[in-house]
Amino acid sequence: MRGKYLSDKNPMEAKKTLGMEEAGNTPTASFLMKIGKIQSAGCRLCKITRDARGESTDGLAAEMHGHINSAGCEGMATTVMAAHHSTPS
């Protein structure tokens, strides 16, 4: 499966994806949808947060590593901002 997915990418993207996989990063919804494991590429963390607040889960942002690591991800916003504003000891 990994070889089929990586062969569809340009060499730099393939190298980056392989590096993330080897590092043990979890697959994102975008990747899982691309390989047919789930139906939606919407961010699962944003969905959980919106469900908890009782809001609509329509129009979720695509779950990618960049989205999860940004304050734009509703499920990670507090953590990301705290890490950004923390000072090294």
Image (spheres, helix red, strand yellow):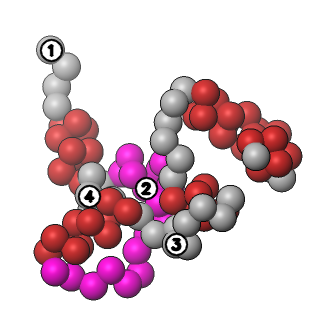
Q: Which residues are magenta?
A: 54-70
Label 4 neighbour load within 10 Å: few <14, some 14-19, many 20+: some
In front: 38, or 24? 38
For the point 37% across and 84% down, the residue is: 58
The residue where tag 1 is placed is 89
In front: 35, or 70? 35
Q: Quadrant of residue 32?
A: bottom right
The residue where tag 4 is placed is 75
Label 3 neighbour load within 10 Å: few <14, some 14-19, many 20+: some
Label 2 neighbour load within 10 Å: few <14, some 14-19, many 20+: some
Dot 3 or dot 2, earlier in sequence? 3
Q: Quadrant of residue 12?
A: top right
Q: CA distance from mark 4 to mark 2?
A: 10 Å
Point out the frontmost of discs 1 and 3: 3
Q: Amino acid at mark 3?
A: Ser
**Which of the numbered marks, if any, corresponds to residue 40?**
3
Check residue 14 for magenta coloring: no
| 31 with respect to 12 (left or right) | left
